[in-house]
Amino acid sequence: MTVIIGIKLSNRTETSTEFQNVISKYGCMIKTRIGLHSTCSAVCANYGIILLEIIDDSEIVQLKKDLTAIEGVLLSSMTL
């Protein structure tokens, strides 16, 4: 079973370290990580969209709980 988690990260510059720590904690479950945020030479957006492809869903409930505990995180998922 494959699970795709879509995450909107607000306050990206303030919460990126905490977010990265959670992602690293569950790194063996994550097959693919794609990060999208708007940027140009003058400004780096303070929000982003992250897509995670989860290949081992044994701890997915705790992963989602840890992610949503971060201020400014909204997530949605689908199972394929």
Image: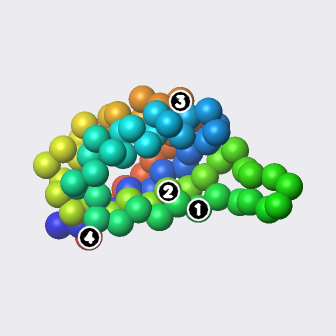
* Residue wearing tag 4: 80
C-alpha gap between disc 4 and disc 1: 22 Å
Q: Position of residue 72 (x, y in %)?
A: 57, 35
C-alpha gap between disc 3 and disc 2: 15 Å
**Residue 50: mark in rendering:** 2
Task: Tell which circle, 2 or 1, labels the residue nearer the N-terminal end.
Answer: 1
Q: Quadrant of residue 54?
A: bottom left
Q: Marks 3 and 4: which is nearer the front?
A: 3
Residue closest to the far bottom = 80
What residue is shown at x 64% (from left), y 58% (from top)? 37
Q: Position of residue 56 (x, y in %)?
A: 17, 57
Quadrant showing the N terminus: bottom left
Q: What element carries label 4?
A: loop
* Residue wearing tag 3: 71
Q: Return the residue nearer the eye: 76 or 30.
A: 30
Q: Mark 2 is on which residue type?
A: Ile
Q: What element carries label 1?
A: strand
Quadrant showing the C terminus: bottom left
**Residue 36: mark in rendering:** 1
